Protein backbone atom coordinates (compact mmCIF):
# COMPACT_ATOMS: atom_id res chain seq x y z
CA UNK A 1 0.00 0.00 0.00
CA UNK A 2 2.78 2.45 0.92
CA UNK A 3 4.67 1.61 -2.24
CA UNK A 4 1.60 2.23 -4.40
CA UNK A 5 0.96 5.61 -2.79
CA UNK A 6 4.60 6.61 -3.18
CA UNK A 7 4.58 5.53 -6.85
CA UNK A 8 1.35 7.44 -7.48
CA UNK A 9 2.68 10.65 -5.89
CA UNK A 10 5.98 10.31 -7.76
CA UNK A 11 4.09 10.33 -11.08
CA UNK A 12 2.11 13.49 -10.27
CA UNK A 13 3.35 16.94 -11.29
CA UNK A 14 4.60 19.03 -8.36
CA UNK A 15 1.59 20.36 -6.48
CA UNK A 16 0.34 21.38 -3.06
CA UNK A 17 -0.56 18.48 -0.75
CA UNK A 18 -2.47 19.24 2.44
CA UNK A 19 -2.98 16.62 5.13
CA UNK A 20 -4.22 16.37 8.67
CA UNK A 21 -1.33 16.22 11.13
CA UNK A 22 -1.05 12.78 12.71
CA UNK A 23 1.58 10.25 13.75
CA UNK A 24 2.65 9.38 10.21
CA UNK A 25 2.16 12.82 8.62
CA UNK A 26 5.81 13.81 9.04
CA UNK A 27 6.96 10.60 7.31
CA UNK A 28 4.63 11.18 4.36
CA UNK A 29 5.52 14.86 4.24
CA UNK A 30 9.20 14.00 3.78
CA UNK A 31 8.35 11.37 1.16
CA UNK A 32 6.18 13.76 -0.87
CA UNK A 33 8.71 16.60 -0.69
CA UNK A 34 11.29 14.33 -2.32
CA UNK A 35 9.18 14.51 -5.47
CA UNK A 36 8.96 18.31 -5.44
CA UNK A 37 5.54 18.70 -3.83
CA UNK A 38 4.67 21.46 -1.38
CA UNK A 39 3.30 19.76 1.74
CA UNK A 40 1.23 21.41 4.48
CA UNK A 41 -0.10 19.82 7.66
CA UNK A 42 -3.17 21.11 9.47
CA UNK A 43 -3.82 20.36 13.12
CA UNK A 44 -6.88 18.10 13.62
CA UNK A 45 -8.47 20.71 15.88
CA UNK A 46 -8.67 23.09 12.91
CA UNK A 47 -10.07 20.43 10.59
CA UNK A 48 -12.80 19.11 12.91
CA UNK A 49 -15.15 22.14 12.61
CA UNK A 50 -15.36 21.61 8.83
CA UNK A 51 -16.18 17.88 9.01
CA UNK A 52 -19.77 17.08 8.11
CA UNK A 53 -21.20 13.75 9.18
CA UNK A 54 -19.24 10.83 10.57
CA UNK A 55 -15.47 10.63 10.48
CA UNK A 56 -14.36 8.75 7.37
CA UNK A 57 -11.78 9.29 4.64
CA UNK A 58 -14.12 11.13 2.28
CA UNK A 59 -15.47 13.51 4.93
CA UNK A 60 -11.95 14.06 6.26
CA UNK A 61 -10.67 14.97 2.78
CA UNK A 62 -13.48 17.48 2.23
CA UNK A 63 -12.89 19.01 5.68
CA UNK A 64 -9.14 19.32 5.06
CA UNK A 65 -9.73 21.11 1.75
CA UNK A 66 -12.25 23.47 3.39
CA UNK A 67 -9.88 24.21 6.26
CA UNK A 68 -7.00 24.88 3.86
CA UNK A 69 -9.07 27.38 1.88
CA UNK A 70 -9.64 29.57 4.92
CA UNK A 71 -7.47 32.69 5.03
CA UNK A 72 -5.03 32.76 7.90
CA UNK A 73 -5.01 28.99 8.39
CA UNK A 74 -2.16 27.98 10.68
CA UNK A 75 -0.15 24.96 9.64
CA UNK A 76 1.82 22.52 11.76
CA UNK A 77 5.57 22.73 11.12
CA UNK A 78 7.14 19.53 9.84
CA UNK A 79 9.34 17.69 12.32
CA UNK A 80 12.82 16.73 11.24
CA UNK A 81 13.87 13.09 11.53
CA UNK A 82 15.87 13.92 14.67
CA UNK A 83 13.02 15.57 16.60
CA UNK A 84 10.97 12.39 17.26
CA UNK A 85 14.17 10.58 18.23
CA UNK A 86 15.05 13.26 20.78
CA UNK A 87 11.47 13.24 22.05
CA UNK A 88 11.72 9.48 22.55
CA UNK A 89 14.91 9.88 24.58
CA UNK A 90 13.26 12.51 26.77
CA UNK A 91 10.30 10.20 27.42
CA UNK A 92 12.59 7.30 28.36
CA UNK A 93 14.56 9.57 30.72
CA UNK A 94 11.34 10.90 32.26
CA UNK A 95 10.09 7.35 32.87
CA UNK A 96 13.41 6.35 34.46
CA UNK A 97 13.26 9.35 36.78
CA UNK A 98 9.66 8.53 37.74
CA UNK A 99 10.55 4.90 38.47
CA UNK A 100 13.61 5.96 40.47
CA UNK A 101 11.52 8.32 42.60
CA UNK A 102 8.90 5.61 43.15
CA UNK A 103 11.58 3.15 44.26
CA UNK A 104 13.14 5.66 46.67
CA UNK A 105 9.71 6.41 48.15
CA UNK A 106 8.98 2.69 48.49
CA UNK A 107 12.29 2.11 50.27
CA UNK A 108 11.56 4.99 52.64
CA UNK A 109 8.03 3.67 53.19
CA UNK A 110 9.40 0.28 54.19
CA UNK A 111 11.59 1.98 56.76
CA UNK A 112 14.80 1.09 54.97
CA UNK A 113 15.77 4.73 54.67
CA UNK A 114 16.23 5.04 58.43
CA UNK A 115 19.89 5.15 59.54
CA UNK A 116 19.27 2.33 62.10
CA UNK A 117 19.03 -0.32 59.37
CA UNK A 118 21.51 -3.12 58.88
CA UNK A 119 24.61 -2.36 56.78
CA UNK A 120 23.48 -4.36 53.72
CA UNK A 121 20.11 -2.57 53.49
CA UNK A 122 21.78 0.78 54.12
CA UNK A 123 24.21 0.22 51.24
CA UNK A 124 21.33 -0.81 48.94
CA UNK A 125 19.37 2.32 49.85
CA UNK A 126 22.39 4.51 49.18
CA UNK A 127 22.86 2.93 45.74
CA UNK A 128 19.21 3.61 44.85
CA UNK A 129 19.45 7.27 45.82
CA UNK A 130 22.28 7.96 43.39
Image (cartoon, grey):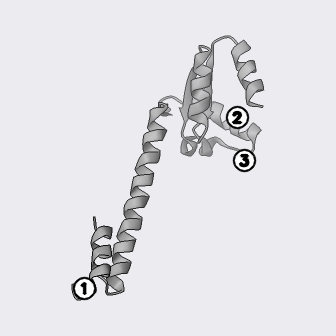
Residue at the spot of label 1: 114
Residue at the spot of label 2: 62
Label 2 – label 1 distance at C-alpha: 65 Å
Sequence-earlier tag: 1 or 3: 3
Label 2 – label 3 distance at C-alpha: 11 Å
For the N terminus, the quadrant is top right
Q: Position of residue 121 (x, y in %)?
A: 32, 80
Sequence-earlier tag: 2 or 3: 3
Residue 37 lies in quadrant: top right
Sequence-earlier tag: 2 or 1: 2
Q: Is mark 3 on a helix, strand or loop?
A: loop
Q: Left or right: 115 with respect to 120? A: left
- Please tell me how crowded label 3 is: few (under 14), some (14-19), or many (20+) other residues with Cα within 10 Å: few
Q: Is mark 1 on a helix, strand or loop?
A: loop
For the C terminus, the quadrant is bottom left
Q: Position of residue 100 (x, y in %)?
A: 37, 66
Front residue of 81/71: it is 81
- Please tell me how crowded label 2 is: few (under 14), some (14-19), or many (20+) other residues with Cα within 10 Å: some
Residue at the spot of label 3: 55
Label 1 – label 3 distance at C-alpha: 58 Å
Front residue of 127/73: it is 127
Amino acid sequence: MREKLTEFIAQQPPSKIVMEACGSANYWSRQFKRFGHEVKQISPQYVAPFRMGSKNDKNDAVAIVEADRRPGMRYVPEKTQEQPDIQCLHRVRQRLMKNRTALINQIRGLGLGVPRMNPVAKKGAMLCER
